[in-house]
Image (spheres, grey):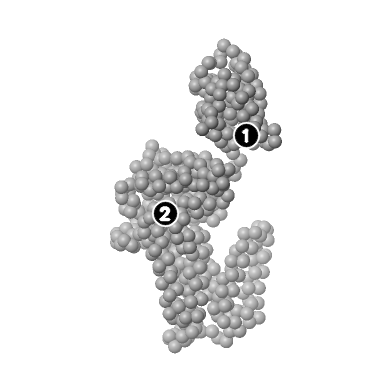
Amino acid sequence: MEKMNSNLADTMKYLEKHLHVNESFDLVYRVINVGGKRACIYFIDGFCKDEMMQKMLQYFMGLKPEELPEDVHEMSKGFVPTVEVDLSDEWEQITYNIFSGVLALLIDGYEKCILIDSRTYPARNVSEPEKDKAMRGSKDGFVETIVFNTALIRRRIRSEELRMEMLHAGKSSQTDIVLCYMDSRVNQRFLAEIRERISNIQVDALTMNQESLAECLYHKKWYNPFPKFKFTERPDTAAAQVLEGNIIILVDNSPSVMITPTSVFDVIEEADDYYFPPITGTYLRLSRFLISLLAFFLTPTFVSLIQNPQWIPDSFSFILLKESPNIPVVWQFLMVELALDGLRLAAVNTPNMLNTPLSVMAALVLGEFSVKSGWFSSEVMLYMAFVAIANTTQANYELGYAIKFMRILTLILTQFFGVWGYIAGVAVLVIAIVSNRTVSGESYIYPLIPLEWKKLCRRLFRLRLPDAVPSREHPEKKKGNGRM
């Protein structure tokens, strides 16, 4: 690795060649005099506060020759008026720090660069996430600045066992990645594996932040739609997962964190399960399970019953279509599935002031007028309205779309192959869940498979008593009652 020398003219020539300081307006350098020696400061405009820069320049330019030490280590420890100071003579590390917002001080005769961390990143205020809300609990949420996010977790876990390990990925972006874990509770083998995977990532940039990182970390069974990671914008949820022995991955410029390893039970759990008493939390959790199952089974079951009306008892004959449809029912369901996604995309791209009127118009056109015109049956609109509402009960987008894909597949199989197609669709769902694995290679539906009845009860029911501290030697035993 190439290193700098003590000659300031050579170092400035190197940085001018590699940083292109004369071409980038926001990359600023200032030649000053420090204790009778020629020096130069490099920094990124926008990452350094003007008031602090002015005070440091006044201090350095005010040093007298007899006050300037001969050793660069003594200079960094006793003569730099700021808290975070580091030394480096490796050009790769120096340029990385400059582009990260660190101020680089080069003094003629010193064989190392003084790196002064006085940066400040543009950031929005900490507020409750729009999507990951809770009826009770804290109202703060992660932001795009990684240092603020680590502080939100530190605020909740004041333990010497908490680790915040900094890594980087991306040849051009050099994106900051932080592994957050409890050293005494995490599975060390899995931690080493995740650390190695991140270190070996060979990409130019993590353009999509966490999604890019997730695809680099997990290559197996990409065709399985069920989520391998859980994402959250809530610091309390992240802190609870860290205390359970899981690993939290924070990516700079992303307002959410990745939780791993993650099973299907982890994905379905939410913060409200624990902010309410055990009986209420259990009801919320089981309701979420039931609604997810209904969202999958409702429309394929209706199509199967339409094909086999003799299976319907007389007391339930009202579920049959009142009028003969102009379009086959299965095509009605598929068109409404597409229309719902269209409405969701339109809501994302619609200004807030137009959301309400456009939503009312869409409801009238797709609801009442589409039924009157004969395009859709009222029963189809009713069942798809329930499905649309059921999808919003899941905070996890990936799980909602996984259920949606399986529902559409089962619909198509039921239409063409009847009851055997219905059975095949359910079998595909079961196989997709059972054969899926977590990032650590464990069962995706543990503790159902392998079966551990007591732990399964804790995952289904919100119990009062907490579990013991999980063991890092046995990661499969760390599933507890205190996670969110």
Instruction: Say what amino acid the circle numbered 2 marks.
Output: Val
- Residue for point 44% across, 85% down: 312
Residue at image x 64%, y 66%?
A: 359
Q: Which mark is residue 377?
A: none
Most distant residue in the top direction: 66
Picture coordinates of residue 151, whole percent (x, y): 49, 40
Q: Residues within 10 Å of mark 2 (few under 14, many from 20)?
A: many
Image spot of residue 423 (x, y percent): 42, 76
**Would residue 97 be visible to someone looking at this image?**
no
Q: Quadrant of residue 310?
A: bottom left
Q: Residues within 10 Å of mark 1 (few under 14, many from 20)?
A: few
| Residue drawn at 55 percent across, 27 percent down | 4
Against 320, residue 363 (above or below) is above
Question: What is the count of numbered marks?
Answer: 2
Q: Which element carries disc 2, helix, strand or loop?
A: loop
Q: Tag 1's secondary structure?
A: helix
Compared to 241, does 67 lie above or below? Answer: above
Give 468 or 411, whichever is nearer the viewer: 411
Q: Are marks 1 and 2 in contact (CB under 8 Å)?
A: no
Q: Amino acid at mark 1?
A: His
The residue indicated by pointer 1 is 18
Q: What is the distance, in whole Å, between disc 1 and disc 2 at their CAs? A: 39 Å
Circle 2 sits on which residue? 439
